Image (cartoon, grey):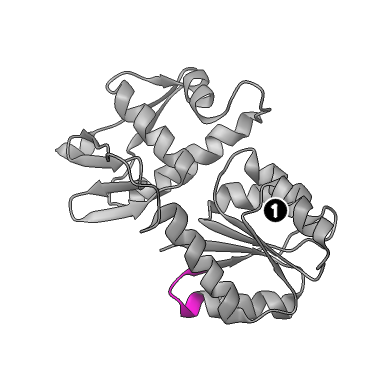
Amino acid sequence: MYKIMIVEDDQSIATLLSSHIEKYGYEAIAVDNFETVFEQFEQQAPHLVLLDVNLPKFDGYYWCRKIRQISTCPIIFISARAGEMEQVMAIESGADDYITKPFYYDVVMAKVKSQLRRVYGSYAPSMDERLVELEGLKLYPERPELHFRDEQILLTKKEAILVEALLSKYPKTATRDALLSKLWDDESFVEENTLNVNIARLRKKFTDLGMEEAIETVRGLGYRLNVTWRS
């Protein structure tokens, strides 16, 4: 199920957006603490973000730039600011689309579905699909999906990178430095806890596939796959 994060401080609009999103079969995640938008994005790993410009503390442009440091997921601005400069600033900050208020909710959903198709679905760029496999666990990095037996789960781009790194190193340990270098370029500042958050989120997805304790922590070094599921 696709997850849509709503960053909107008007509670009535956020509630209506959530209702429409869920009506279309997606999961709606409405942010309620506007000082920790980036942290919530990292924890939830949504597939798309609906982002207002006028927000408490920091504006939407700021949060868009922060998200773009770690993700290429679609970001659609929804704002009462209808000026040309505001829309230019949104696009330059990394947004994929811009919708002005007041708006029709069906139009918003049409744009959401279009972005999801473009990035994850039928409109995604075609390429020779790769498959990385280990002991019945199958990773399709370009989708990105993880399959095990009759179950499958969607990954974020960074989760897919982590899984591929762990698979390629098995049975050896993937060091923290090696994993960080694959996720972020050398010019990006990365907090120490960022990799821990991504690993924790990935462990939950393995659990959702019925694979308990699939990622083992090697103290002082990094992480490795624990293929106990094959027994």
In the image, residue 186 sits, relative to residue 205, either above or below, namely above
Number of disc labels = 1
Residue 18, given in percent of the width and then of the height, sits at 58, 75
In the rendered structure, which segment of residues is drawn in magenta? 22-27
Residue 35 visible in the picture: no
Q: Is 26 part of what is drawn in magenta? A: yes
In this view of the protein, which residue sits in the foreground, 204 or 37? 37
Q: Say which residue appears at 66% left-offset and 27% top-offset.
A: 188
Q: Say which residue appears at 60% left-offset and 59% top-offset.
A: 49
Splitting the image into 4 quarters, where does residue 5 fall? bottom right
Q: Is 62 part of what is drawn in magenta? A: no
Residue type at numbered disc 1 = Val
Within 10 Å of the Cα at label 1, are there few (<14), some (14-19), or many (20+) other Cα atoms? many
Q: Name the residue under label 1.
A: 37
Residue 94, given in percent of the width and then of the height, sits at 67, 47
In the image, residue 156 sits, relative to residue 166, either above or below, namely below
Residue 230, given in percent of the width and then of the height, sits at 16, 38
Considering every residue shown, the one lying at the far front of the view is 84
Q: Say which residue appears at 83% left-offset and 64% top-offset.
A: 83
Considering every residue shown, the one lying at the far left of the view is 231
Q: Is mark 1 on a helix, strand or loop?
A: helix
In this view of the protein, which residue sits in the foreground, 199 or 90? 90
Residue 117 visible in the picture: yes
Residue 41, given in percent of the width and then of the height, sits at 61, 51
- The image quadrant where one finds the C terminus is top left
